[in-house]
Image (cartoon, rainbow, N blue to C red):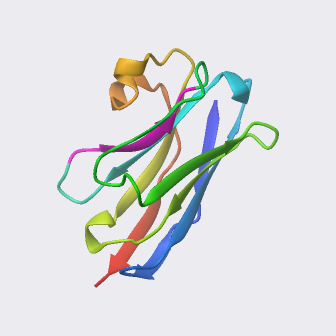
Amino acid sequence: VQLQASGGGLVQAGGSLRLSCAASGRTFSRLSMAWFRQAPGKEREFVGGTKWSNGHTYYSDSVKGRFIISRDNAKNTVDLQMNSLKPEDTAVYFCAAGSSIISSSVGSADAYPYWGQGTQVTVSS
């Protein structure tokens, strides 16, 4: 599976950005997809994900109510709409994919074997 993330950039606090991740190489509809982020000096952090087997979407508490994940199985893409951005959302954002993600592991980076290259999001105050 190859993942290509795009859409990062610089935005002021309170603004919005939309990230997109395009997948290829495997049946997209049977892939669970997730977004993680990593700020300098910090561990990689789960942002949100969507599990293919039950269609559920999961979010970390830090982004719940502000970020929205959507997937388009026809286009093999998963998007991350980020609203009400805060300076603490500044990080490199990665999309990840896996075919055997169980609900209890949705937020675990180790559960995902496939990763995109990351896209920088910078939120200025």
How many numbered marks are there?
0
In magenta segment, residue 2: no
31 left or right, relative to 82: right
Which residue is painted at 23% across and 60% down in the image?
Answer: 40
Task: Locate the N terminus by quadrant.
Answer: top right
Main SS, magenta region, reads strand
Q: x and y percent of residue 58 in the render?
A: 44, 37
In magenta segment, residue 48: yes
Q: Nearer the viewer, residue 95 or 102?
A: 102
Report the span colored magenta: 43-51
Q: x and y percent of residue 31 in the render?
A: 62, 25
Instruction: Answer above or below: position of 13 versus 49.
Output: below
Q: x and y percent of residue 86 in the render?
A: 31, 72
Which residue is painted at 75% across and 36% down in the image?
Answer: 73
106 left or right, relative to 78: left
Which residue is painted at 82% across and 39% down in the image?
Answer: 74
Q: Nearer the viewer, residue 91 or 69?
A: 69
